[in-house]
Amino acid sequence: MKLLVHGMQSSGATAFTLFLAQRPDVLALVDIPNNFAAPRVDPPLDMVVKAVITTAYPIDVHVERFRPDRTILLVRDPRANYRSLSTKPYRNHSGLIDEKFAVLEQVYADRHRFDAVIAYEDFVVGDRAVLDTVTALGWPVSAEHLRFDRRHDAILGDLWHHLPDLWGRMDIVFGNVQGPCVSSAFRKAQPDPVIDARLATLCPTLLAHYRLRDAASGS
């Protein structure tokens, strides 16, 4: 089985993919760099890859190349996502930050094309529904996988053993995963009226969805 995760930079999609890579019998590219498309591969084991939202490579390009059996869209509150990405040196790589959030709006509007949509906020608190959704796709996971026991060296070693040609075709990176396990420390968005106003234009549908989540939770 091949599984593709798609999400914005600084959305937590890399941490989510690392979680999916905790099975000992899978191959994983937990963070394809923004200047690369998903690879064309015929892996001997199940494989998961994560591709970020850019203006350079639409989701259709990643799908055509990797040919996944299942796809997951990972979303995060755009207010927290924008605030985080705006501090990163790569914020304007493969598209200006505002352009990428406009693309995110279209991807979210077309979310029916994905086999599952997972919210970062549900993932980091260990919501049982996230585990059940992923397992139902044919990718069994458990709460133990939230500990990130399978570390980078094991994942890289398996890639080198089974797909050594990848190392000459693309950069192999691990993104900005912080800490030894899944953490909810960065779950909440800090209020910022300037960012809110900008996102109301760039990705109004996703912003409205998260405002409804706030209202439902009383936050």
Image (tube, helix red, strand yellow):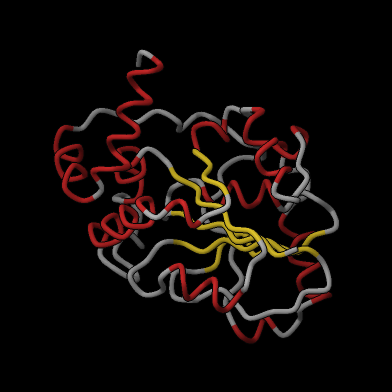
Q: Is residue 47 above or below residue 138?
A: below
Q: Residue drawn at (79%, 60%), measured in percent from left and top?
A: 26
Q: Is residue 212 above or below residue 12?
A: above
Q: Residue drawn at (46%, 62%), measured in percent from left and top?
A: 52
Q: Residue drawn at (41%, 16%), measured in percent from left and top?
A: 217
Q: Is residue 132 above or below residue 88?
A: above
Specify the quadrant of the image occupied by residue 134.
Answer: top right
Q: Give the left or right position of residue 125, taking residue 148 as reference.
A: left
Q: Is residue 219 above or below residue 49?
A: above
Where in the figure is residue 102, as x and y percent of width and height? 26, 57
Where in the figure is residue 177, as x and y percent of width and height? 56, 48
Q: Give the left or right position of residue 112, taking residue 84 as reference.
A: right
How many tags in the picture?
0
Where in the figure is residue 8, as x and y percent of width and height? 41, 54
Specify the quadrant of the image occupied by residue 189.
Answer: top left
Q: Give the left or right position of residue 125, taking residue 151 as reference.
A: left
Q: Give the left or right position of residue 146, taking residue 72 as reference.
A: right
Q: Quadrant of the N terminus?
A: bottom right
Which residue is outermost to the top?
218
Which residue is outermost to the front?
112
Of 135 and 187, nearer the camera is 135
Q: Quadrant of the C terminus?
A: top left
Of 90 and 64, nearer the camera is 64
Q: Residue drawn at (32%, 57%), measured in percent from left and top?
A: 106
Where in the figure is residue 68, as x and y percent of width and height? 64, 67
